[in-house]
Amino acid sequence: MSAAGQGWNRREFVGAASLLALALGVPAAAIRLTDLDAQDAPTERQRSLMTRVADLVIPRTDTPGAADVGAGDFVILALAHGLSETRAPMAAANVTAALAPFRRRNGSLRYLAWLENALDRSASGDFLRHPRERQAEILAALDEAAFAKEAPFSPWNAIKGLILTGYYTSEAGGSQELRYELVPGKWEWNIPLTPEMRAFSSDWTAVDFG
Amino acid sequence: MTDNEGQFDAIVVGSGITGGFAAKELTEAGLKVLMIERGRKIEHQIDYETETKAPWEMEFRGEGDTALYERDYAVQMLNRHFTEFTQNHFVNDAEQPYQKAPGKDFDWFRSYQLGGRSLTWGRQCYRWSDYDFGANKRDGVGTDWPIRYAELAPWYDRVEEFVGVSGAREGLAQLPDGHFLPPMELNVVEQAVRERIRAKYPERVLTIGRTANLTEARPEQGRAHCQYRSICARGCSYGAYFSTQSASLPAAQKTGRLTVVTDAQVHRLSYDPATRRVTAVHWIDTRTGEHKRAHSRIVFLNAGSFNSVHVLLNSRSEAMPNGLANSSGVLGTHIMDHASTLAAKAIMPGFEDRTTFGNRPTGVVIPRFKNMETLDGDGFTRGYSYQGGAMQSTWTQGKRMGGIGAEYKDKLHQVGPWSMVLVAFADSMPRAANRLTLSKKLDPRGVPQLEIAFEHGAEEHAALADAKKEAAAMLTHAGGKVIMGFDRPNHGGTAIHEMGGARMGWDPQTSVLNRWNQAHDAANLFVTDGAQMSSSACQNPSLTYLALTARACDAAVSMLKEGRI
């Protein structure tokens, strides 16, 4: 990887993704940002920001955190491909003065640019230059407003959702933080639930309807 | 395959649930059969490419590439069962277009491949009762079914014994028991709800979904018991659920009398008015564009409900200008799809210290309890039933929760709270205005597209309104806190029970098929997929399609042997 503060060129981009893949034992093609259209390619700063934000949501504990598994890059890929309806034109009622500048010509929102701007504004400057504790406070405030009862539309809900997807569908998130059992082999209809038992990432019905 | 006179006794068009079964029945009866499939070949076990993949091995983690889906799978992506893991088992909408009548919606979920939707189906297997076969006669909507339950019961037996259906016997008139493998257990919440509902409503029964998943291995069929993964639609190398690949195709192949052609879109049948017989089946090789045809003594159309109707409409000729087997003029009319919606979702407190292990590939069912002995429906004369179940949430509940950081993360690794859902499925009334026609627009291979005109009516709305009310009452009584419920039906097609269009009936003036699924107008033509249906009932239809297929195959073979066709 390049030295701190240096920009990433295309080759390093691929190289880093491969290293990450190697470390996690997933196929190298898992997160492929190099195929994105130019207008969807993130800036270096946006990648760092997304990685940090993902890590603030799901930090490393006794299991890896979102930054360890590349969840930030997954969010960028997911936003470029419109997962969670993030490339759909915004409903007219949701277009506020604060969001209007971030709309694309087709009416969809540039989520990443919005997040960068929102965090920098809350930070009265460069969000990334603040200590981690301050970053967490800023993000927690943004999160609280977005998830409050009767809260108006916030792009944060979709971004946060994609961070969760990026993390809990990674190998560490899915099989260390949660339990993953591809072939249960049996059905037990009533067993005790104890506090140390973790949820299954392979409970597909729960994933769908949870 | 243009000069094959004498080579085939029967041609089966389609290889899905009914086509595969027809091929098995006809070959086992000694006939030489050609089965024609419009999609690609998928080989059991070998071609289930995503079956064992983890989300982290998928580029879009199982959710799929929305940009790709919007471009090529604009309809299929609306199906809950369509994911990055299963997308290779559904059609590309851009390559397989259809038209919707102006102002009307119909989401047509399709699987064009060897095995058809037998690879992706919901596997729920329910017998119909005489409440269903007698429905049209009772309220006067649609044409009377030319059969009743007693005639079909032995064929249900035969089919269930081959398919392998797990379920619990309940002794219900409206949902007759079958030959069941041991049932999968209700989970702890569902058991409690069953008892609590029964205590207040003695006539209402919550039972385990009857499903075509083996609870006991079938070594003689090369099928293992269910592994409780509940990822069936990816394809199951254990052969634990019934599909063409796991069960009927190997049986048909074992006879040595089956020929299979794939990548072959049947678009037309030719008909000889002098003999009143179908004389050839025509298809387009979708890889080369070449037009081909084959002959046989009898033809079974099992192209998948609307597609069978499509072939008949497109087989119009001088003798039959409105479509083959359409002297009645009802071909394409009276199409149906169950009106369905999430009638209730409730949080179920009191079971915080209980959980389950494994993914059970079926839910629960509450069979119909309205409009049975008396017509007690408010604005509707037929039935509805519920499917659903109780479950605990997992990490996705975090998408609705505020919070960030270690505490939030720790909360999300806990097994989430119990909830229970009841999804209502209501009878779809057979209406002449809901119909299929040929569009002037052509598909990429030059075949006129199918146009679908469908909408639910007042009866379906009334049934779902009642279903919402009753679902809330039952779950509330059972200790639940109802948090949502709907009574507007989802788009037509979304139940994936589209049927009708070539209905059975007594009278050649008002129906397409007779009581043996034989076209009134063409003695050697049989239609035994969903197109045959004269009414919809409110339970899943595939088992009934299979029973009718088995019965029609037997009848056709007898007619052939007796020289009547």
Image (tube, grey):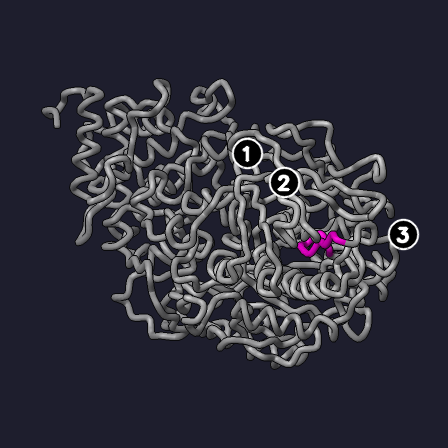
Mark earlier in primary sequence (1, 3)? 1
Q: Which residues are magenta?
A: B524-532
Residue count near mark 3 (Cα–Cα under 10 Å), binned few <14, some 14–19, many ≥20 = few
Q: Secondary structure at mark 2?
A: loop
Q: Mark 2 to mark 1: distance in Å? A: 20 Å
- In front of the other: label 1 or label 3? 1
Residue B135 falls in image quadrant: bottom right
Q: Which residue does the image show at 62% across and 44% down from the upper left? A: B4
Image coordinates for residue A192, horizontal then vertical, percent:
33, 74
Q: Is residue A138 visible?
A: no
| Chain at numbered mark 1 | B
- Residue B509: mark: 3
Mark earlier in primary sequence (2, 1)? 2
Q: Secondary structure at mark 1?
A: loop
Badge 1 is on which residue? B286
Q: Secondary structure at mark 3?
A: loop
Q: Do labels 3 and 2 touch, CB within 8 Å?
A: no
Residue extending farthest left: A3
Q: In the rendered image, which quarter contains the N terminus of chain B?
A: top right
Is A180 above or below relative to A195?
above
